[in-house]
Amino acid sequence: MILLDKRATVATPKVTSETVADASPSVFAMPYPGVFICTLVRRDPHSSCISLTLVSAATGPAPKTCSSRAIGNMSSPLLNDVKAAIDEITREIEPRLIELRRDIHSHPELAFEEVRTAGIVADELTRLDIPHRTGIGKTGVVGIIEGGKPGRTLLIRADMDALPIHEDTGLSFESKNPGKMHACGHDIHTTTLIGIGAVLKKLAPTLNGTVKLMFQPAEEGLGGAAAMIEDGVMEGVDIALGM
């Protein structure tokens, strides 16, 4: 598996659209033999929806039922299926994810300068009790979620860097860093992967295999993926999924 950085060129010096406004996520899951599929859809009233798909490394059929004991302290005594579990976890974490996304959006950092962003990621993984390593590929972060049963290793990758664009949207959470903006959605990617980590951590006892959460720096043309690969992020990975 090879992860490639796109070579982006910036033609627009200023972004005034309000399409960066928050949207409520909805999550659903479907069981298939040997694979567990979870799709997170963000609906934005100002633009077309953004759909992100997560495929797990499960080697057996997805569980049809999850008890509250199996996934952590949940309010329901018995959840009928994985979808119900994900729905409940998502409702719990949604306010925090919106808060995180707005914070990251208002403090954009360019390639290999994502020190603050990486610190937020590390703090959230610590809060979620997800083991992780920092400084991978300079400013990258890698989290590890071990499933309850042995199996293959899935890597899910999100990017963290912003673009050298001035933001003039007038939003309450617009960029505080002149000449820098999350105009390519990496603030959403980073926040989404934190949310995926929160969901999978609670579902970990039901999972087969291991999930690596790869928070990549420098996607915008400076080789962040290559730097993380050089530092060993792909070691032991069977399946990779990138946003």
Image (spheres, rainbow, N blue to C red):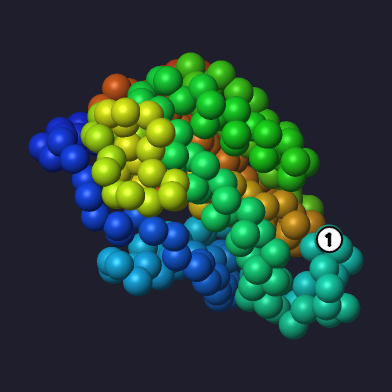
Relative vertical location of residue 198 with respect to residue 26 in this rendering, above or below: above
Which is more toward the observer, 100 or 214? 100
Relative vertical location of residue 143 with respect to residue 115 in this rendering, above or below: below
Q: Residue furthest left?
A: 11
Q: Could you tell whether 109 is left or right of 73 in the image?
A: left
At x 82%, y 68%, the residue is 74
Q: Could you tell whether 29 is left or right of 67 in the image?
A: left
At x 68%, y 34%, the residue is 123
Relative vertical location of residue 138 with respect to residue 213 in this rendering, above or below: above
| Quadrant including the N terminus | top left
Q: Quadrant of residue 219?
A: top left
Number of numbered discs overlaid on the protein picture: 1
Percent from the top left, x then y, of residue 61?
64, 70
Taking the image as drawn, is residue 101 in sight?
yes
Q: Could you tell whether 4 is left or right of 95 in the image?
A: left
Taking the image as drawn, is residue 1 in sight?
no
Q: Could you tell whether 127 is left or right of 234 in the image?
A: right
At x 28%, y 40%, the residue is 167
Which is more toward the observer, 78 or 46? 46
Percent from the top left, x then y, of residue 115?
51, 22
At x 86%, y 63%, the residue is 73
Percent from the top left, x then y, of residue 134?
60, 23
Q: Which residue is mark 1?
A: 72
Percent from the top left, x then y, of residue 14?
19, 40
Secondary structure type for disc 1: loop
Amino acid type assigned to the residue bearing label 1 in the image:
Gly
Residues packed near mark 1 inside 10 Å, few (<14), some (14 to 19) or many (20 plus): some
